[in-house]
Each structure stands twice: as structure tokens, then as C-alpha cells.
Image: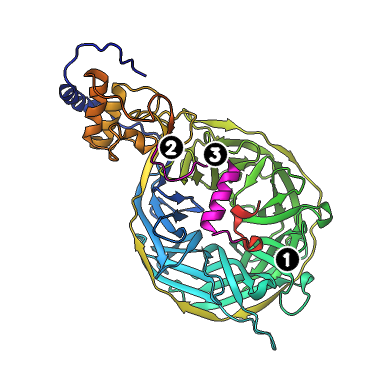
Amino acid sequence: MSSTSTKPKVPAAPQILAILLLSLAATYPVSAQEHMANIGTRHFEMSMEMIPTADGNYVTVAPVVRTSSLSAGPAVKIYLNKIDENSNVIWSRRIAESPDGQHIPLSVVEIIDPSGNAVGYAVTGFDFQFGKTDPIFVVTTDLNGHITNLRRYGGTLPIPGANITPMAGVGNKIIQNNQGQLVIVGSLLLIDNVGVVPFLLNVDTNLQLNFLRVYHDARYLNNLFGFGSMASFDDIVVAPAVDDPQTGQFAPDGYLITGGTKPAGTALTAETLVLRTDLGGNPVATGVYGPMPSASVESKGRAIEYTSLGLVKVVSLVVDPTGAPPYTQVFTLNPGNLNLLQQDQYFGFISHGDIRETVNGEFILAGRGAWDREGAVLRIRNNGSIVFYYGYGSTNVELLTDVHELYDGTLYSSGVTTTWCRGPADQYMVRTRPDGTLPGCPVLSLNIDTNSPQEPKRNTEMAVEFLTEHNTSEGMDITPNTVKRHICPGPIVIAAPWDWFIRADFTRDQQINVGDAIASLSKLFSGGPDAIPENAADANADGAHDLGDVIYTLSYLFAGGQTPAAPFEQVGPDPEAEEPNIFTTEEFFTYFGLNARFGQTQSDLSFDLEFE
């Protein structure tokens, strides 16, 4: 930090400002193919899924949690962003059901018309309106993210003498099948908490209902349909027809689905469920996998992939009651009868919901480190051996929920960060080399331990029923103030909470010098990077970043001007800060639970981030 005891004789601040403006011609923001960045608003956002688009870009879907002193509680809306491969924002939308709908979006798909052209996007997720008989929602937009349709689905189970209806629901995954229809899987909480049953919903792209099927594991049937059963579907992929090489039995075109199943009210008995259906949702083959219930652990299927070798890969999260961190298990299954061919465990890696095959036949998974608390990518070979396992992040919390291989072999991940934010949390984007490295950025080689257990497949049986309710709802969308921050390579980030800073220290190097004035001018006139946090740019503490801040900094440095207001002598929080810091993963889940779920604790109706 500059001393104020003596100052050299230099031109006045306005003259220096003219010189610095000329110097902008020689300055430009650092750019690189591999990078770390975050996008968001002044509120809480986290990317739940990222998908490639037909034009070579990407769309992310996230909840945006907005708090206000004028409202009784937080507002949770759909946050949809289109970005390019360098994390630049193409458009941004905040979508809500009229008049006051609250949704946590979990999955998005690009809609393709019969001619093969992209025409828009469809989103599903969790709805807050408990007690409604149509809790499953799907919203569609055009290619610019403007809402075109919103419908809700549910209904009464067709059981004589009973009036069993849903009271809450969650859509965990949405895809488009080869017939052009939208297919959604998730789970429904039945009235009076008598059970949770998974569903498969099939609709046309105009959201007209084709069918809604609900399922239950027949092992756990006590009284009537689904009583005492807790089950969910979490991921689905299209499955081509196959002749089973072991039995010769034909399996038609349909779907491969994974999730979890357990009896209600019984701890430590959840198992990973895998189901193969035909195109109508009728079960063709089923199985449960993972540690035996007697092992006193719980497992749940999170992601499923049909591989280029014609096999099935299933990712399962395993929770240990001893207090050890959750770990990840990957199963390789026969595509027809779902017999278990291979299984591998990865201690130290917590999957957050995807597995994708790369061009060379390896597989990439996104999640976080169990011990290192970094957003992490795990790359494995088909035989289960590890290629690499790296963490990407800094002093607070990062989670990665999705990872893709790009055309050039680089890997592009999305998730959430609480370190480099405009609010409590932002969407987090990381693009690395094919080997997982990211030169000039904080990358950790994480600790991981593997083994290959010998646990057999167990048989189960799925029963099905139809629901028929479907209703149209009104929606609205607005364009929020979304900002991208290029984190790395480029700006220097110190080991401090995201919203702690030294006032006027635009470059975040804990020094006030002419470089901060240049960086401030670059932001104002050349589209340069933001300060981290943005309030650091407010040198004169008037609540805005403008030319006055540049003049104030130069006057302090060279003309005996006033010392900037606190925080200044050392790194610290903004006295006007309104949002709390999130330092640890536990604090992150606490914040997300209290704000995004309003304290609701329907754990068996949960989506992936809550299965801890």
C-alpha cells in the first residue's frame, strides 16, 4: 500500500487521467481458451445443468434466489442463460409462473422440430406449491429464452375406494426422444405423506399430454398403491432396441432410467434403482444395486449413460452413516437385462449428477471433493481406472454439476461458486485442457481412493398406474442484470472471502497504485474485467463506479487527496454488505436449504444436491 508521508511532484490528477486514457489503447482484457469465470446477478444463482446447443453454444439453467425487505420470504425463479464456449453471456432470462410461482429448475433440453431445426428450450424442476394435485411443471421458451408455454401435470390415482393424489412433485430430468416428444422423470409425494412414487411423463413439444405413468417398487407395497414406498427417478436416456447377448431376449426401443428406492420410515436401506422401459413406459427389465441393505449405507442412482460399446454406465452416490463423506460408485450393466458386469467405487469424490462419454471412450463426471471441498472433475477409463481427478476453486465453496467435452477435446464444466461472486453465490464456469489442467489458475490434484466391490444385482418389480390431470398456466420472463466475470487466467484473486476487499484496489493485489486506475478505466471505457468484488472499484464510496472513482484514486496517489474510506487499511467486508458470506460447504447447503426450500424438509422428494 502506498505511503502518504511524502509524495513526488507530479502533474495534477486530471492531467494524469488524460495520459492514462491514452494508455488504454495498449491495454486489453486477458483472454484464453481455458478459463475460469462466473456469471450472475447480485442474488444467489447456481447452475444445475448445462447443455450444448445446435449453434455451438451452451444453455445453463439455475435457480435465482432473491431476497427483499419488501417481501415475506425469498423469491425463487428460473434463471436461464445462453453462453458461448468462453462463458460470455449471449442472453439471460428470469422466468416465473404468474402471478407468484416459485420454482427451482433442475433440467433443460433444447427442442428440435421434425425438420431438425432448434426451436427453443424446455425446463422442469421442483415446484413450491405444496397441496396442488398437479405439481409437475414444464415450461417452454423460444430460442431467445422468452416463455412460450407452461403446463402442470398430476391427477388422482385410479384406485377404487381411495382418493390418493399428489401433494408435491419434482421433475429431475427432461430429454427429447427420437420421436420428437419431451420425456420427464422425477417423483411425486402422495397426500398425507403416505409415500413417494417415481413418474415418467411424456408430452408433445406443445406440452399436450400423451401419458403420465407413476411406478412403485412392489417389494414395499403395504396398503394400496405405493403406501410405505419412497422412490424417485433421477436421470433418463434413450435406449435403442437390443437382442440380449446372454438370453437372446429382445428389448425394444425405450428408456433407461436410474434413481433410488427404499421403504418409508426405515433408515439406511435406500438402494440404487435402474429400470428399462419401452417407449410407453412399460417396464422391460429392473434391478437394484449398490451396498446390501445390511451394510447400513444408502445409495441412490444419479446419472445414466448408454455407451458407444452398447453398455450402460450408472453413477450412484453412497452415504455412510459413520460420518465419513459420501462417495461415488459406477456400475456397468448389460443393456438388455441390466445384469451387473462391473462396479467401481471412488472414495473422495462426490458426484453431483452426470456422466458423459468422451470421444476416446473414456468418461467424465462432475462433482466436488469430499475432503478438499473443491468443484471437481473425475475422468475414468472404461475399465474404471482413473485418468485424473482435479479440483477447481479457491477459498470458499465450489461445486460442479455438469461437464462436457468440446470439439477440441477441452472440458467445459458448470456449477456454483461462493468465492468470486456478485451475490452469495454465482454460476461457475471452468474450461480446462483435455488432461484437466488449467495453466495459471488454481487447480488441485485431489485425494481419491478406489476399489472394486463384489455386490450382486438384486431383483425387483415395478408396478405402474396412469395419471391424467394437465392444466395450462401463465408465465412471464424478464431480462435480469447478468454479468460475467473473467476469473482466470488474468485477474489475481487473493485468499479472502469474495466480498472482502481494500477500497480502490481494483486489481485485488492488496496495493493501491496506478494499475488500479488503469484497470478502472479499462472497465469503464474498454469493457475490461470487473473489480472483485465490484465494490472495490468504488474508490470514493458514493455507491457507484464512474470516472469520479478514477480521479479520486489518482488524487490520493499523486495530489495529496483524501484517504479512501474503510475497508482500506486491511482487507475487510463492505460496511453496507447485505448478504452473508458462505465459507464452507455446510454453510452453503444451510443457506440454500433455508432460502431456496423455505425450510421444507421432504428429503425423499429431494433433488441431487440434498442427498447428503
Residue bounds of the magenta highlight: 574-600
Circles 1 and 3 in contact, beta carbons < 8 Å: no
Q: Amino acid at mark 3?
A: Phe
At x 28%, y 40%, the residue is: 544
The residue tagged 1 is 286
At x 47%, y 59%, the residue is: 73
Image mark for residue 604:
none
Q: Amino acid at mark 2?
A: Asp
Q: Amino acid at mark 1?
A: Thr
Q: Is residue 209 above or below residue 271?
A: below
| Quadrant of image for the N terminus | top left
In the rendered image, residue 68 lying in the magenta stretch gets the answer no
Location of residue 604 in the rendering, given as x and y in whole percent from the top left corner: 66, 62
Name the one closer to the observer, 61 or 546: 546
The furthest residue to the bottom: 161
Q: Nearer the viewer, mark 1 or mark 2?
A: 2
Location of residue 406 in the rendering, given as x and y in whole percent from the top left corner: 47, 44
- Mark 2 lies on a secondary structure that is loop
- The CA span between labels 3 and 2 is 11 Å
Q: Nearer the viewer, mark 1 or mark 3?
A: 3
The residue tagged 2 is 499
The residue tagged 3 is 583
